[in-house]
Amino acid sequence: MNEQLIKIDGIELCTDSFGERANPAILLIMGAQSSLVWWEEEFCQRLADEGRFVIRYDNRDVGRSTTYELGQPGYTFEDMADDAIRVLDAYGIEKVHILGMSMGGMLTQMIALRHPERVITITLLATSNFAPHLPPMEEKVIAFFSNTEAIDWTNKQSVINYTIGRSKVLIGSKHLFDEKRINNLANEDVNRSNNLVSMENHGVVSGGESYLARTSEIGAPTLVIHGTEDPIIPFAHGQNLVNEIPGAALLTLEGTGHELHYDDWDVIVEAISQHTSKPTPFR
């Protein structure tokens, strides 16, 4: 790992990188409650092997980045979007390709609208603009997250068990559930976390609505990647993004849930490699 702790504007953001700095940069933004480790090292290296400089980082309240008191996140989604620009500035990167998953995809849309001069292309994985007409998450997901009060956040094994259970709920029928792999990632996650319970703050962060209502104004070339069996952000959300963002393309992952499963890496990496070969925005 090439971890770097960025201290800027009164906060700390933990980053990691792969590949040569001279190559075109791809910034990876992960979803809620998930640190940079969920962009698995092998996945990042595969992107780097395509001739890209890959950066992953911990959002606020996860991993080794700044954390806040439970229930009182001292930031908005706009602040989280601007954190991506702070990371780029720290690395001296003027323009970037961005890949965002779930909440990270929501932030990616905001960045494309808030800082269009910094964005070359965007890839939106398992995410949405959360338009009101779109279908809600499945009942099994609601039931799972309604039991989070049973987690003992002072006990690492309790948090690991919660993480494994969450992954089981979100996987699609196409893939086998690799509990050993998820357990290893969960162990790495909890062992490098500044404050485990602070991940819950992602559920109460506010802001972003004015940007998500403007997805039709996104000018960066956009690739949408979405699984047909996503139980938390149903496939219709990905289709909606393609319909709203001018010129957007859709990569459909049949039988995939809300996950970045290693069985899908080949097709995802190939699609991102082709997408990020586009030199300039189309408008």
Image (tube, rainbow, N blue to C red):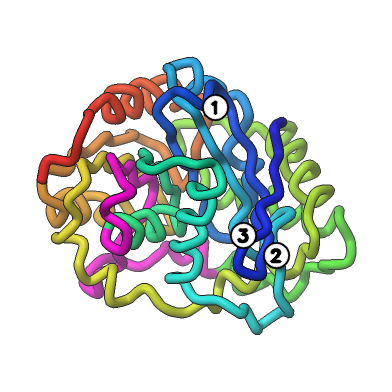
Above or below for 69 versus 114: below
Q: Is residue 268 magenta?
A: no
Residue 14 lies, in percent from the top left, at 67, 50
Q: Which mark is residue 66?
A: 2
x and y percent of residue 150 in the render?
Answer: 77, 72
Q: Which mark is residue 168?
A: none
User: As rendered, which of 55 and 258 lies closer to the eye?
Assistant: 55
SS class, disc 2: loop
Q: Is residue 212 above or below residue 102?
A: below
Amino acid type assigned to the residue bearing label 1 in the image: Phe
Q: For this view, does 139 lie left or right of residue 235?
A: right
Going from N to C along the chain, the mark reached first, 2 or 1, is 1
Nearer-N-terminus badge (3/1): 3
Residue at 41 percent of width and 78 percent of height = 207
Q: Which residue is mark 1?
A: 43
* 35 with respect to 271 (left or right): right
Quickly name the residue at label 3.
33
Seen as rendered, the residue at the extreme front is 92
**Amino acid of disc 2:** Thr
Residue at (75% x, 40% y) in the render: 183
Tag 3: amino acid: Gln
**Image quarter (top left, top right, bottom left or bottom right) of the N terminus:** top right
- Calculate the distance from the C-alpha at mark 3 to the C-alpha at mark 2: 14 Å
Q: Dot 1: few (<14), some (14–19), or many (≥20) neighbours within 10 Å?
A: some
Please tell me in which quadrant of the rendered image residue 158 appears. bottom right
Secondary structure under the numbered disc 1 in the rendered image: helix
Query: Which residues lie in the magenta part?
Result: 113-142
* Residue at the image point whose x is 48% and y is 54% from the top: 84
What percent of the width, then of the height, locates residue 60?
62, 63
Quadrant in the rendering for residue 234? bottom left
Whether residue 58 is situated above or below residue 43 in the rendered picture = below
